[in-house]
Amino acid sequence: MDGALDVRDLRYFRAVAEERNFTRAAERLGIAQPPLSRAVRQLERRLGARLLDRSTRQVTPTAAGLVLLEEAVRVLDAVSAAAHRTRRAARATPAVVVTAKPGVATDLLRRMTRAYAAQPDAGRVEILVSGYGEQGGMVRDGRADVALLGTGEDDHGLDLEPLTTEPRVAALPAGHALAARSVLSCRDLAGLPFPHCPVLPPHADDYWWGRDAREEAAAQPGPVVRDSSQLLEAVALGQAVALVPASLAERNRRDDIAYRPVRDAGPYTLAIAWPSGSRSPVIARFVRTAIEVASHHEPPSHAAGPPPRVVDPPPGVAGPPVRLAEASARQG
């Protein structure tokens, strides 16, 4: 039996496995549902494995399907990255593409790009504004060269260097009983509803709900949010409480939200991320510039973290990059 796969097979299967629904997957792919269903069944026959458990309401990947999904994401990202990076390399003037979500270290990013552009023969800097949870994927599939990532975001397949660290504070509805206190602990927040962001990795909930500080700091899942604006609205309406970076609180002062320090909440680390093992001199130059600029940047406060695990840096970058989760201190 011929088990060969092509890119179309993987794209189709990935869409169905991620959407858990053939209709939504077909809409995402821009095709009709019947040919998509036939293509997935043909793929199962070709591989000799059932990839999906089907019901009238949704489809769920089997154990074999989960393996194929993981491999499909990796292969499709690599194919996309090859195309994007080849096109950028063919330009007369090399450009570095940076992605970040709105409102994240805007001043720091502005100073990074200016410092880089001021260097001789540095080329252009292109900024891509992205949504929550999109930055890592945009680097992996080649749409961006580097990204600014915060603690809890998906950093697999990337190398990182921490840039800034700051405390997190509790965001509370203005009339909440805890708002009467001057300082809180994660235990004070136990049992309260916290927002859930489905586009972030599952382990991110432990960090954003305060479980990184104390096991007993349990939380109730609250409303689904997809960006900081939705999160703050959920808090203001009394639907949830949240742990947020101090800089976000400073940028979003409002009468219907009270911010309070949390003594044992681990800090928030902002890092620059690039493709693991990259040997691009353009990326190395921008990363080096970003690290230098960030060394003179003063976020709301600094907190020391544990010694990070070292991975190989790109050529020309002073100092080892680290995994982002290991760069954030976990204080309890």
Image: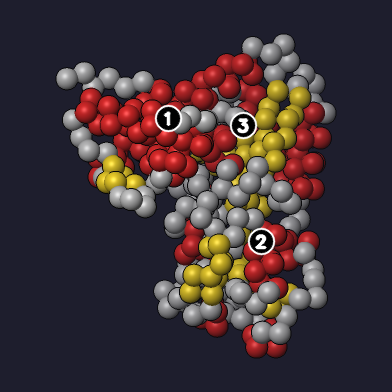
Give amino acid for label 1: Arg
Residue 126 falls left or right of residue 215: right
User: Marks 1 and 3, how far apart in space?
Assistant: 20 Å
Give amino acid for label 3: Ala
Picture disc at residue 11: 1
The quarter of the picture where residue 13 lies is: top left
The quarter of the picture where residue 329 lies is: bottom right
Tag in front: 2 or 3? 2
User: Marks 2 and 3, how far apart in space?
Assistant: 26 Å
> Foreground residue, 54 or 201?
54
- Residue drawn 65% across and 24% down? 282
> Foreground residue, 267 or 222?
222
The quarter of the picture where residue 61 lies is: top left
Against 81, residue 149 (above or below) is below
Tag in front: 1 or 3? 1
The location of residue 303, given as percent across then percent down, is 62, 63
- Residue under numbered circle 2: 230
Crowdedness near tag 3: few (<14), some (14–19) or many (≥20) residues, C-alpha within 10 Å: many
Crowdedness near tag 1: few (<14), some (14–19) or many (≥20) residues, C-alpha within 10 Å: some
The location of residue 174, given as percent across then percent down, is 73, 80
- Residue under numbered circle 3: 144
Label 1: element kind? helix
Residue 162 falls left or right of residue 14: right
Label 3: element kind? loop
Give amino acid for label 2: Gln
Across the whole image, how many numbered discs are drawn on residues? 3
